[in-house]
Image (spheres, rainbow, N blue to C red):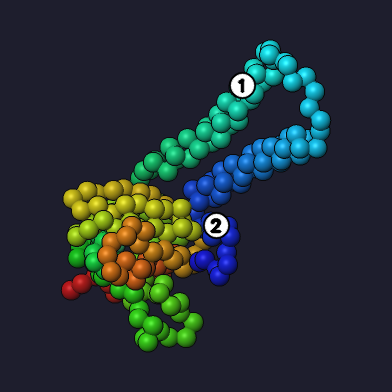
């Protein structure tokens, strides 16, 4: 989860998120290099008396300052495209969850089971128990087995919402009449918090998402209690 005054990303809980963190660090290195270089040039310009102000031709340096930025852009674009296609890949999921956005709660359907569906409402502040998180806790966690490829089908029933869990590297629009598909595999057990990420109305801030990654045994025990008679 996010900490107060946090500057970077949350720790990755899925392989795709680790890839995204690497891309971010890679891009930031390029940014720092360019910024340092530009700062150096600016310092030179304001501390040096300029000479050769009549120069009209500089073929060599013009070639370099055209080609070099292009190469740098390609060095950022290629790893980015690689992750884009990795995120798009839906490989034989072990489990499918349908997340439906409502004003203002999420409904989850485990479509591999008959009649396994529940609503997840935020726990109001006055009903919180010690150790739970204000504005992030929900009454029903969405539980998945750890290390299992899980597919999420995201849609909405009323207005636009967005199903987002930063630690898993997921943000998918929930659109009425459309079924968006995304995929994640949790790499460790834990609670991963997210929030609706598309302004959807008065209680947009109060429809959080809690993904709980547990062992397969715990998941199976929980799923039998959740199936409606
Ligand atoms: Cu929403």
Q: Is residue 41 visible?
A: yes
Q: Is residue 164 above or below residue 51?
A: below
Q: Picture quarter containing residue 128?
A: bottom left
Pinpoint residue 52: horizontal percent, then vertical percent: 78, 19
Q: Are marks 1 and 2 in contact (CB under 8 Å)?
A: no
Point 35% across, 62% down: residue: 196
Circle 1 Cα neighbour tier, 10 Å, few/some/many (<14 / 14–19 / ≥20): few
Q: Nearer the viewer, mark 1 or mark 2?
A: 1
Q: Within 8 Å: ligand 1 and the Cβ of disc 2?
A: no
The quadrant of the image that shows the C terminus is: bottom left
User: Residue 42: image x %, image y %?
Assistant: 72, 37
Asked whether the viewer can see residue 217, the reply is no
Q: Which residue is mark 2?
A: 9
Q: Residues within 10 Å of mark 2 (few under 14, many from 20)?
A: some
Residue 82 percent coordinates (x, y):
49, 36
Q: Which mark is residue 67?
A: 1
Q: Is residue 229 left or right of residue 201?
A: left
Front-most of residues 29 and 221:
29
Q: What's the residue at 29%, 58% (across, down)? A: 161
Q: Please identify the quarter of the rendering in which residue 219 is found.
A: bottom left
Q: CA distance from mark 1 to mark 2?
A: 33 Å
Horizontal side of residue 159 vs 37, given as left or right: left
User: Which quadrant of the picture is home to ligand 1?
Assistant: bottom left
Secondary structure found at label 1: helix
Residue at image position (20%, 53%) is: 176
- Residue nearest the observer in this picture, 78 or 13: 78
| Residue 141 percent location from the top left of the image | 36, 70
């Amino acid at each position: 989860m996010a900490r107060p005054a946090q500057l970077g990303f949350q720790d990755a809980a899925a392989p795709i998120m680790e890839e995204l963190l690497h891309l971010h660090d890679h891009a930031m290195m390029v940014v720092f290099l360019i910024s340092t270089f530009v700062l150096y040039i600016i310092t030179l310009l304001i501390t040096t008396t300029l000479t050769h102000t009549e120069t009209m031709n500089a073929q060599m340096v013009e070639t370099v300052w055209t080609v070099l930025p292009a190469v740098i852009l390609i060095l950022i674009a290629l790893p980015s495209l690689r992750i884009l296609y990795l995120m798009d890949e839906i490989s034989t999921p072990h489990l499918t969850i349908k997340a439906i956005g409502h004003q203002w709660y999420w409904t989850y359907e485990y479509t591999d089971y008959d009649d396994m569906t529940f609503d997840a409402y935020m726990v109001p502040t006055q009903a919180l128990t010690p150790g739970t998180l204000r504005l992030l806790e929900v009454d029903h966690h969405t539980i998945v087995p750890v290390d299992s490829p899980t597919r999420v089908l995201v849609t909405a029933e009323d207005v636009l919402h967005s199903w987002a869990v930063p630690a898993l590297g997921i943000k998918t629009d929930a659109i009425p009449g459309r079924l968006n598909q995304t995929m994640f595999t949790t790499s460790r057990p834990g609670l991963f918090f997210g929030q609706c990420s598309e302004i959807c109305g008065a209680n947009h801030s109060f429809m959080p998402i809690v993904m709980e990654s547990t062992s397969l045994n715990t998941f199976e025990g929980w799923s039998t209690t959740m199936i409606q008679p």
